[in-house]
Amino acid sequence: MTRITRAGLIQASLNERTDAPLEKIRDAMIDKHVALIEEAARQGAQVVCLQEIFNSPYFCAEQEPRWYKFAEQIPNGHTVEVMRGVAKKCGVILVVPIYEVDLPGVYYNTAAVIDEHGEYLGKYRKHHIPHCKPGFWEKYYFKPGNLGYPVFDTSAGKIGVYICYDRHFPEGARELGLNGAEIVFNPSATVAGLSEYLWELEQPAHAVANQYFVGAINRVGKEAPWNTGEFYGKSYFCDPRGKIIAQASRDKDEVVIADLDLDMIEEVRSTWQFFRDRRPETYTGIGRI
């Protein structure tokens, strides 16, 4: 029997002023995304991934301790609790990227994974943390991830997560493949002029090298007062051959739906035996430099 997973991506713009009370920003973004998740569910999505730190602006455009108060515990914080209810109500698996507080003063850029029954399956913490102009001051807010590259076994397939800047590093993408991922989601917040030329290059390359599906998500619009650039959307799915099979626009809130034929993974791996032909015993310099 053919294994088809109907998967969804959600890209959205900020709909509150960044100087509004933090709870007001959070709740407005949650409400917006709940409506979009419900739309994905109506279209038959079995799994849906949201964008990086979906319930807030991309506050890393400034270095301001106010935003530390936005961080929540996982799984016991407000946003994940709400999303557990949404997942159960809609019958969809959710990948929920938020700002996580682990201990006082210890914060991560994290994605929680929730199954269609509302059960919390685990989390991925972003490993690669940028700190560069213009306005990507992430080391001020996040510690590097310390939970490895987990793969979550779900009714929609084996799901891995890579977050935004991670996508520039092939090593973790390979780890996800070796750990059995069939679909890797990459929730992002990235702007035109900085990375757009790489957007449709790197992630299809990961899909080809590791022979799995990739769902790449990016937010849309400009966020005042920082205006560090335009988040250009263009969220997409690509298959294990690197072909983009569904893609959103660059300038509006949107749900992207695609049917992923998971049997294609074995078909492609039977043609291109990249995992068989790896030579890890020769890659001795990777961890030394």
Image (cartoon, rainbow, N blue to C red):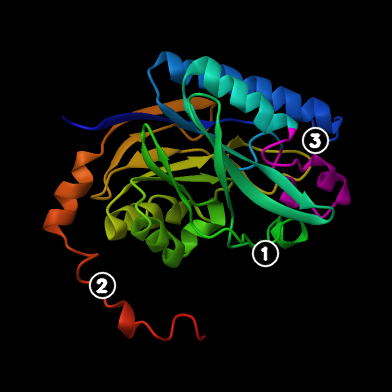
Dot 1 crowding, Cα within 10 Å, few <14, some 14–19, many 20+? few
164 w.r.t. 127: above or below: above
Q: Residue 15 bears which disc, if any?
A: none
Residue type indicated by callout 3: Thr
Q: Residue sitting at 43 percent across and 32 percent down?
A: 248
Are circles 2 and 1 on residues that touch, CB within 8 Å?
no
Q: Give the residue number, with chain letter if any, for mark 1.
A: 132
Q: Give the residue number, with chain letter if any, for mark 3.
A: 18
Residue type indicated by callout 2: Arg
Locate residue 217 relative to residue 56 in the image: left or right.
left
Describe the element under mark 1 as helix, strand or loop. strand
Residue type indicated by callout 1: Cys
Residue 265 on the magenta segment: no
The part of the chain drawn in magenta is: 57-77
Judge by depth and name the residue closer to the eye, 189 or 22.
22
Q: Residue sitting at 75 percent across and 40 percent down?
A: 72
